[in-house]
Amino acid sequence: MAWLFTCWKGYRTAINRQYEEHRKWMIRSFGMTLVAVSARLLVPVLLLLYFVLHGFSLPHGMETVIEEVLNVNIWAGLILNFVIVEWVILKK
């Protein structure tokens, strides 16, 4: 939904000839597009973090580890991309 919203806002600002706003919304759309890639890249980091926080043991089995990491990785990717994109926009 976030990706569709950012694409729609980018389209509307281009139609209204607000090209600077269009650029910002399309950068946001590109960031939302890359969430799946970012989330996959975060899996090793999240696995390492899980093991460090649990004393390098698997108290509930490997299936629980995978389930918890996969539940967190998409949100971590979304937040990471959102922060990076907004930083790029505000930097200019």
Image: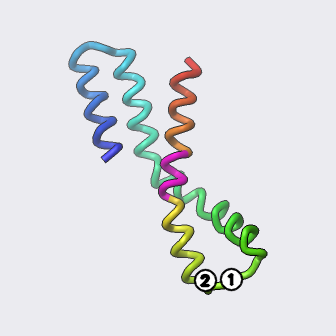
The residues colored magenta run 74-79
Residue, x 64% and y 63% (percent of image)?
A: 46
Amino acid residing under circle 2: Met
Above or below: residue 27 compared with residue 40: above
Above or below: residue 45 compared with residue 89: below
Q: Tell me the crowding category of disc 1: few under 14, some 14 to 19, or many 20 or more residues within 10 angstroms, Cα based.
A: few
Q: Tell me the crowding category of disc 2: few under 14, some 14 to 19, or many 20 or more residues within 10 angstroms, Cα based.
A: few
Q: Secondary structure at mark 2?
A: helix
Of the 4 image quadrants, the one containing the C terminus is: top right
- Residue 22 placement, left or right of 55: left
Q: Which residue is mark 1?
A: 58
Q: Which residue is mark 2?
A: 62
Query: Per the image, is 77 magenta?
Result: yes
Above or below: residue 61 compared with residue 2: below
- Residue 88 placement, left or right of 45: left
Q: Main secondary structure of the magenta part?
A: helix
Asked if the residue under mark 1 is in contact with the one under mark 2, i.e. CB atoms within 8 Å, the reply is yes
Q: Quadrant of residue 49?
A: bottom right
In percent of width and height, residue 19 lies at 34, 15
- Residue 60 placement, left or right of 85: right
Q: Quadrant of residue 66?
A: bottom right
In percent of width and height, residue 74 lies at 48, 57
